[in-house]
Structure formats: structure tokens, C-alpha cells
Amino acid sequence: MLVIGTAGHIDHGKSAIVKRLTGTDPDRLPEEKLRGMTIDLGFAFRGDDEKGTIAFVDVPGHERFVKNMIAGVGGIDAVMLVIAADDGWMPQSQEHFQIVRLLGINHGLIVINKTDLAEQDWLELLTEDIREKVAGTFLAEAPIFRVSAQTGDGFEELERYLDTLPARISAQRDIGKARLYIDRSFVLTGIGGVVTGTLRGGALSVGQTVSVWPSGASGKVRSLRANNREVTRAEPGHRTALTLTGVDKENLVRGGVITDRPDQTYFEDRPVLALSMELLPEAPVSLSDRRRILFITGTSEVEGEIRMYDQKVIKPSQSSIIFFRPDQPVYALTGDHYIARLPTPMVTLGGGRVLDHLPRFPYRREAHRYEYLKTRTSDTDLVLSELSCAILIPSNTLLEHSTLSPSQVSSAVKQLIKDGLVDRFNDKLFHRAHLESIVSAFEEQASAYLKSKPHLKGLTREQVAQFSSTDAEAVTDLLDWLIHRGKLAKLGDRYNLVGRGMSLKGAIKVAHDEIIAQLKEQPHTPPRLALLAKGGKEHRDAIKFIIESGEGYKCGSEFLFLTPAWEEIVTFIRKQLNATGKLAVSDLKDRFGVSRKFALPILEQTDRLRLTTRDGDVRIKGDRYDS
């Protein structure tokens, strides 16, 4: 089914044209019929399953109801721009035209109505004027029809053209991400809450579990009605009404979204939107930091504050990138089109597309991190730019919150791999040049740091994150990659550059030799750690080196034994347990000439290792004795 939206100035006859084409009056509200103008969205249908069905979305032309107009044309496949012959191109003609252009509509036709009220010469001039105004846009080559909804003149030609459109224009794509922006909600006796809207992005079926934005409530589709018929499945582009079970009616409000995505935390955790912004030539103000705007996508509209990216001011007719923080999070996919208006007075400023979702406003010093936003144009560029924002991304989650379907993402990835720009690792994707630059910067910083501290065993996880400018979540992937590529080796809780050894020099070497001498002098009764570390930072670094290099063994928090001395103690303990099945404190005292001050910490350490376990006054084999 093809969805065509009307656009045009108030009282130019949009509803009258739809009525003559379909036999249905799209003005449904009593107030609309009384006042003779459309206030909210109206709907009517033409055609059949054989020729193809066209759904008309009739939108209001009055300036006070432009937000309703935006809600109507947000889900259409083509636009019918209506201009009255007696009035010509009017303010709402211009505003509606700009809105449908900014919303990414690529197909359309132009209808000059009320030809019975104008002379032929005037119609020729009006046609020429319209052509000039739409030059260079998607309507530049659009057909222009001259009709009179009052008399019926010209409708035969218009109808013949419309009946060819379902076969010529691709209807909305199924990208596997169903969304229904609620434009109406009401209660039917015996049925409950009903919501209506134009279904986008995917299909919905009776019995399917869905969630409701922004409440987060989930429920099941109880019934579906699409294009005025009861159905079990509604397709993208269908004018859809549905009822839900398990959802309170107060959660079903205009501007909300019914979606097949169960998890909405992505949008809640990343409320700031990066937006492309084109300011209209007729915009009454320029945009600068902290300006408040009204953001409209689908039927959702929310005020919020903006921050500029690389320009201090965006003037009318200019384009740039802005960051927008709505007062409440918005459900909008990367790639969605939007319209920006002034909250007061209600005037259209411009619009563009959602480029990304961010957890907060970026700081000025971070501007270089957002260069990727400038490249988000084609599908391939979007995939490549997304991969440039991370270390590795699982294939099945890449751009899952965008308007690209999984098949589009997969196709783009295949081409990028073929071109040598992207590769896979552990079922994850990475941008070759991006990862190489991160690794190169990390190696440079890590090498310089470890060269200045040769006594260290390696880097902590936190240091790897610091030297690679990587967050705590992504550093796991980076470490796996570096180890896999043979650039890092894991040594306990540290990570060392492959091929790098540990060494000592200067004051730390002096402290090390002093400590080793003391440990050799008293191998089984060493000085307490606190006493060894009293010499200051050099002694503490020397102790760390002795432990990390394997020269010594740290026994609890109290003592440091030379490794051969500790191994001698452990060997005796094993020999004693193998011989008698038990070990007493006195056995250690007799064998090594130590007091309880040493014997107890030794046994507490072997208990922690589960080599031994306490059984009354003696130790027996622990559950890791044989490991």
C-alpha cells in the first residue's frame, strides 16, 4: 500500500480533493465540519488489492496546526502539494513544502485546485511560479495537475496518474523494527484502549508482545485493524488501529510509540541527540548555544536545549551539526528525520536527521571525537563511522538502533570487508584504520611509561584504558585483541609488552639489594613487610619488583619470603601431610626454628590457598591440595 500525504495552505481544498478521489470525507471531527477546515489528521483510501491501494493522509493547513501536519507526513511515501488557483503560493504552501523536503520525502505531485476561479493566463503564470519555487528539489520534475474539486474538471487525468503510482513507487520498507507513533487514542466500550497511527519500519501481528514508549509498559496486541479492515497482521505503511492487553490506558497517549523493541534503555541512557540541522531561509532567528527548540518526529514533540558543534551560530539558509538535549528522552532512531520549531511563537525553523545518541552534551575539548558525525551519509559511511566510535562491535548489534535493516548493514559490512576497511575478530567487527591508530597510540605511551619504570611487571587494566583513551567497557575487547596479536602478555593481574623484561636501576636497585640481603640472612624469619617498606618509595617499589618478578613470595599482609624459602616451607608441609595426614604448629616450629609469630601467618596463608584447612588444633589437606 502506498501512503500519500496532502500538503498546502489552509482552504486550498486538500480535503475536498481527497473526498472526490476516494468518496470519503477526511474531516472527521464535528469542529472540522463546522469550521470547514482540517484540525487533525484525516484518512481515506483509494484502489483495491489488484490495482494497489493508496492511503491518503489529509493534513491541516492552518499555521496553528502545523505540528499535526508534521505528524501526518512523517510516515508517507509521497506528497500531494495542493495550491489554490485563486490564491497561489501562500505562507503555508512554503512551510509545508519545506517540511516535507526536510522529512526526506522523495516523491510527489503538485495539484493546482480551484481552476474554475482563475483565467487560463493566470494558471500559466502560476504554473511557472510553482516550477521556480520547487526547482532543485524532489518536486522539480513532478507533474502538475489542474483540477477543480468543485466541478470535477481535471480529475480524470489526476486519477489515471494516481492509479499508476503503487506500481511505480516503493512503499515503506520493512526493516524489522516496527514503530507506531500514536496520533490518536481512545476507549471503546467492551474493548478498552485503542491507538491509531501509521505503522513504520516493520510488521505487527495479533498476539505479538510489544512495549510502549515512554512508560516502558509491555503488553500483547489483542486486535488489529489496517486500512479499515480487521487483520491478523499489519504491514509497514498501513494505517493501523490496535488494542493492547496488559497496558493501562493512561500510558497510551498521543506522541507515544508502540514498538516491537522490548528494551528501551538505550534511548533513556543516551538522551542527547546529535542532529544535522538545516535552517530554512525564512527562519526568523539564528541558532546558537542554549537556544530552546521544539523537536518533532512522528507524533512525538518535545522541547529542549541545544549546543553547537563547530559553529558558534547557524544563520538562516545555513546547515551544521547541533546537539539537542530534550526535556524528556525521545524515541528516535539514528537516521530518522525531524522538524525543529520555535516553542513560541510556533514557527518552523528547519530540520534534518538524527545522527547519533549520546549520554550527555560533549565538552568543547572533545570536539575532535565527533568528526564522524560529518560522514554519516550513505549506508556504508554510516556503518564505517559507527565502527570508528568503538573498538569492536558485535555483528548482531551493529546499528540496531538505526533506520538501517539488518540486511542493509550486512551488505555494507561485506563491501567494507572486501575493500579492506573492516575486519572481524571473535564474531565482532572493527574498523582497521581506527583500531590501528588506537593500538599505535597505546604502544607509544605504554612503552614510554614502562621504560621509565623498568621495575614494574606490567600495566594494570586501568592503565591500559588510560593509555589507549578507552573506556572501562571497551578495554576488555582491546586487551583480547592485543593479546591475540601478540603485542601484550598477561602476567597475573598485569599486562606487559611482549619481549619486555623487568630490570632495576638507581636507588630502587640499591633498595632491592638491601632487602634481598636481609631476606637471605633470615630466610624463614624475615623482617615484617612494614619494616622493609620503611625506607620510603624506593623500598616500596623494590618490594613490588621482588614480588612481581617472582624473586619473593608475599605471605598474607605481614611477611615477604624469598621464593626458594617459601617453596621449601610448602614442600615440608606437603611431606608432613602425606606422611601423617595432619600438621601442627609445632611441626613448623621444630623444622624451621620459627615462633608462633611466623608459623601462624604461614598456615593462614596455606589455608587461603586451600592447600590446608584447619581441623581443631591441626591442619589437614585442603580441597585444593592436589591441584
Image: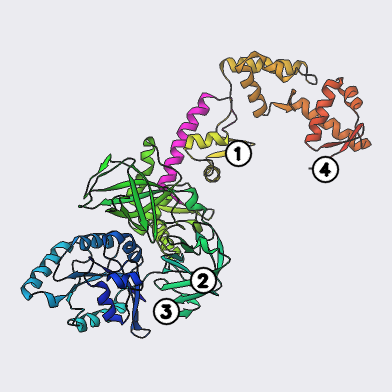
Residue 270 placement (x, y as % from top left): 46, 48
Range drawn in magenta: 430-459
Q: Alpha carbon of mark 3 to alpha carbon of mark 1: how far?
A: 65 Å
Between disc 2 and disc 4, the foreground one is 2
Residue, disc 3? 228
Q: Amino acid at mark 1?
A: Lys
| Numbered circle sitting on residue 490 | 1
Q: Which mark is residue 623?
A: 4
Looking at the image, tell me whether mark 2 or mark 4 is earlier in sequence order: 2
Taking the magenta stretch, the answer to whether it contains residue 449 is yes
Instruction: Look at the picture and state if 359 lies above or below 350.
Output: above
Q: Residue at x 81, y 26 (%)?
A: 601
- Please state which of the two labelled residues, at mark 1 or mark 2, is closer to the viewer: 2
Q: Earlier in the sequence, mark 3 or mark 1?
A: 3
Whole-number angstrom distance, CA of label 1 to CA of label 4: 27 Å
Q: x and y percent of residue 610 in the render?
A: 80, 38
Amino acid marked by disc 4:
Asp
177 vs 95, left or right, is right
Sort mark 2 into few (<14), some (14-19) or many (20+) by Cα contacts within 10 Å.
many
Which sits earlier in the primary sequence, circle 1 or circle 2? 2
* CA–CA distance in space, label 3 to label 4: 71 Å
Q: Position of residue 359 (x, y in %)?
A: 46, 45
Q: Main secondary structure of the magenta part?
A: helix
Q: Earlier in the sequence, mark 1 or mark 4?
A: 1
What is the secondary structure assignment of the residue under circle 2? strand
Question: Among all residues in the image, which is located at the extreme bottom?
Answer: 50
- The residue under label 2 is which amino acid type? Thr
Instruction: Compare marks 3 and 4 and give the one earlier in the sequence.
Output: 3
- The residue singled out by tag 2 in the image is 243
- Distance (Cα) linking label 2 and label 4: 60 Å
